[in-house]
Amino acid sequence: MKKLIISLTALTLTLLGYCQTTTWELINLSNWGIIRLPPSMEVQSGLYKKIVDEAKKEYMVEGDRIIFQQKGLNSFGNFDTYARVIIKTITGSPGDFPKKGELFATTNELSELNSSYKQDILKVCKAMNAQLLKWTDLKNTAINGYKCLYFNYTRQISGKPSTYSEFYIFIDYDRQHSLNLEYRTADSSTWQPELEKCKSTFRFK
């Protein structure tokens, strides 16, 4: 009975989260995926939102790098917090990657990729004059039924608040998509639930 109650509670919370996000703007990601834009965020200036269906609040944003940021930043305001949703696409050749849904890295592959990703992040930290405070190793996981690779880390630029960052990496035959969520750790009570709900709306088309 206890397990049933826990399961029903989890289902109720999921449905509540879904209901809360259905009024958010629907963003069509260059015709390969969709995600909803939290009302507390905006598409970064320079990334044009084209109306797909005004009644349904559906918009198209095209590009290899799509960024959501805390609302007000485009108007040079709201610097008191920091949050990002960064969706990046790397296009290769047919067969460069397994087909969507076939991704499952072995232990050895995870170890090798983990080392590579960590070195990349360390280089970025060095360029930003930042310190890598915490690293969570790469693993196989899934979002909304889509298999992907996942890792997270915390960094801190000298004299600045620390920032939490997590990556979800999806592959699809000739391209790689990454979903990156970031926010200041001091603001986690605000941004962690908001970005979790945003992540739950991500879908491939």
Image (tube, rainbow, N blue to C red):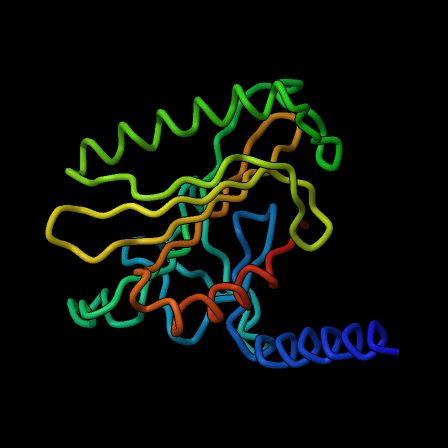
Q: Is residue 147 left or right of residue 155?
A: right
Q: Quadrant of residue 44?
A: bottom left
Picture residue at 41% right of the left edge, 40% below the top: 135
- In the rendered image, the quadrant that contains the N terminus is bottom right
Q: Quadrant of residue 144?
A: bottom right
Residue 12: give x, y in percent of width and height: 73, 80
In the displayed orientation, state which residue is furthest to the left: 159
Position in image of residue 106 (x %, y %): 68, 23
Q: Looking at the picture, how far across and down is residue 103, in whole percent?
A: 70, 31
In front of the other: 23 or 47: 23
Q: Residue at x 39, y 49 (%)?
A: 165
Q: Is residue 145 above or below residue 96?
A: below
Horizontal and vertical percent position of residue 122 = 30, 30
Residue at the location (75% across, 31% down)?
102
Residue shown at the point (64%, 54%) measured from the top left = 203
Left or right placement of residue 195 versus residue 68 in this view: right
Q: How many marks?
A: 0
